[in-house]
Image (tube, grey):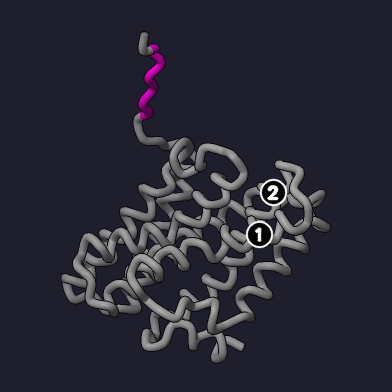
Amino acid sequence: MLDTLAHIFQPLATKQFDLLLVIYLIAITTEAMSGALAAGRRNMDVFGVVVIAFVTALGGGTIRDVVLGNFPIGWTQHPEYVYLVLLAGLATTVLARFMHHMKRIFLMLDAMGLVAFSLIGCTIALQLEYPVIVVIMAGMLTGISGGILRDVLCNQVPVVFRRELYASVSLVVCVLFLGLQTLGVDADLNTLFCFVLGFGFRMLALRYGWKLPTFSYQQRWD
């Protein structure tokens, strides 16, 4: 199965994707489930659940590919990804009553997905030979756009703009990944190091409630 799914990353057939591919599968599944839960909090019907699950799991990569002109978009060539996220979304409607017991696990898996998506986005942009700033933006788009789409469709201020460090974690991972690559660090070691550091950074932010400074403006214009 992994051999089949790995085709989505061609011509990016490098060894560092072995680890990222497994994490990617976990990430799109958990992101689909988080999207389904968000839809449930808004009392959406089954169609709404599967739509929110889909955009949460695959929206970031779709936006990245459209922005970069990287066609065909991956999931259009691999419908098994669509089946996976839709099934995960539907399964959530059945398992939702038990999921409050798995909050910590979901947070860990979400952190893994954030880092994996960011690294995948960076690598794809690098392979397409985009400038450094575009590579960083591509990584961040892949990492956070699905969650932004989920929250906007559920009529909420996106979580990435108002809670613990999230987008900042993606930024740090992307910059570090590019920096180590410039220094000639082995690709596998670079990927593993960035993944571990990014995951640890995100979990520490959750543990200690690290946030960026907020801006509040309440003055009325008369």
**Left of 50 or right of it: where is 184?**
left
Q: Is residue 194 above or below residue 148?
A: below
- Image coordinates of residue 84 in percent, x first then y, are 67, 73
**Left of 197 or right of it: where is 109?**
right
Q: Main secondary structure of the magenta part?
A: loop
Q: Quadrant of the N terminus?
A: bottom right
- Along the line of sight, which residue is nearer the eye, 207 or 97? 97
Residue at (78% x, 57% y) in the render: 46
Q: Is residue 28 above or below residue 101?
A: below
Q: Secondary structure at mark 1?
A: helix
- Per the model, the C-alpha gap separating discs 2 and 1 is 9 Å
Q: Which residue is mark 2?
A: 39
**Left of 145 or right of it: where is 125?**
left
Q: Which residue is mark 1?
A: 51
Decide: marks 2, 1 in contact (CB < 8 A)? yes
Which residue is situated farthest in the bottom direction here? Answer: 3
Task: Let me know if residue 185 is in the magenta part.
Answer: no
- Along the line of sight, which residue is nearer the eye, 137 or 71? 71
Q: Secondary structure at mark 2?
A: helix
Question: Mark 2: which amino acid?
Answer: Ala
- Along the line of sight, which residue is nearer the eye, 35 or 112? 35
Residue at (56% x, 45% y) in the render: 151
Residue 14 visible in rendering: no
Give the residues in magenta.
214-220
Residue 182 visible in rendering: yes
- Image coordinates of residue 37 in percent, x first then y, are 70, 50
